Amino acid sequence: MDENDKMAVATSNEQKFEANKVRVKIPPFWEEKPEIWFFQVEAQFSIANINQEETKFNYLVAQLDPKFIENIWDIIQSDEKNKYSCAKSRLLSTFKESEEKSIKKLLTGISLGDMKPSQLLRKRKSLAGDNITEKVLRTLWLDKLPDSIKNILVVSSENLENLCVMADKIFEINSSPEIYSADADSSAMKNILEKVSLLEKQISELYINRRKSRSEFRNSSQTRNKSRSRSHDILIASTNEMQQENHLKIVFERLNTYGLKINISKSVFGVEEIEFLGYLISNEGSNPLPEKVKAITNYKKPETLHDLRIFLGMINFYRRYLKDAAKNQALLHDYLKGAKKRDKRKIQWTEEAEK
């Protein structure tokens, strides 16, 4: 090869190198997900047709911040031929989450926040890998969703992907921002007025339907009966006695306007707490009924799968008050895999499950 040929080859290599240098765009190092970052980097190398260890290593070192360089400084100074592979292995082992840490984060560390339910599920799937069954993953995912979504999905038998689509749709419907007043009395009053307005609308609809019924069935014996309210109980929350009196006056006037009556013998006024739908309601919020809690704590140890299903049903009524409910019940739910509705098979308890 003469000098001209050598110069032509050298020029060609330089041009190729310059072209590669322009085309390779390495993103900043992703400390939380180094494996994804290396996938992006090597995709850039593949596009630019870069195969040499030394060239890859030079690009890597040029991109890394000094705080990451110190983790591979000994490799930089060494005579190692495969510096890129060694540096990649070092960075992955240093920053990639361990399996134990990923599972711990899966169980306790991720909440919905600003994410959609589908994004939360994908994040949990990524952390779970092959270590968690789909049923346990479903339980963990549902446990982190708002009650307004969870209470709808928990009774569904759809697979996880279909549940995910449903959850996103419900989330979009309920995603209007809520504004909370710093003044507790003002916030409570606004909430009460909204409930009264809704009640007024419901009563108006009942009244219209009643009048329509009378016009159509004027000769029916049913027209001689007075209209009675078949709606649910009316809860009126107030911050003091004066406010309670005003709220009651508003509600009674609405009921009287539309000819509706209440059963005084079944009514309770001016109390600080009241039982409602299985909960104890007070100014501190809602709590489980003491007798219900006692019934759960005194429940005998389940002997059959059917007994276990009943026990879990009792507990799950109050699961919102149980910390790490999904995590603690995961082993119990595993017993019910493949079980029939009234399965009378005996349970072989393990020491871990009995805890």
Image (cartoon, rainbow, N blue to C red):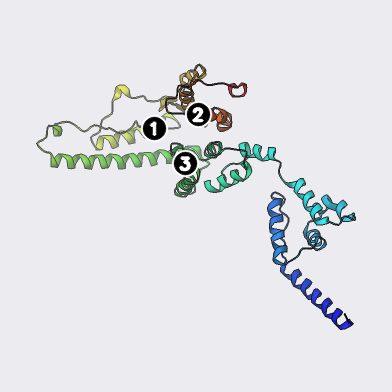
Q: Sequence-wise, which precedes: disc 2 or disc 1?
A: 1
Label 1 CA crowd tier, 10 Å (few <14, some 14–19, many 20+): some
Question: Residue 272: x percent and y percent?
Answer: 45, 25
State left or right for residue 264 relative to residue 210.
Answer: right
The image shows residue 285, relative to residue 299, as above or below, that is below
Question: Residue 273: x percent and y percent?
Answer: 44, 25
**Which dot, 2 or 1, sits closer to the camera?**
2
Q: Residue furthest front?
A: 1
Label 3 CA crowd tier, 10 Å (few <14, some 14–19, many 20+): some
* Residue pointed to by mark 2: 336
Q: Amino acid at mark 1?
A: Ile
Seen from the viewer's position, the closer of residues 110 and 190 is 110
Label 2 CA crowd tier, 10 Å (few <14, some 14–19, many 20+): some
* Residue pointed to by mark 3: 149
Can residue 284 be seen here? The reply is: no
**Which dot, 1 or 3, sits closer to the camera?**
3
Q: Which residue is depicted at the point 77% across and 60% down?
A: 63
Seen from the viewer's position, the closer of residues 246 and 214 is 214
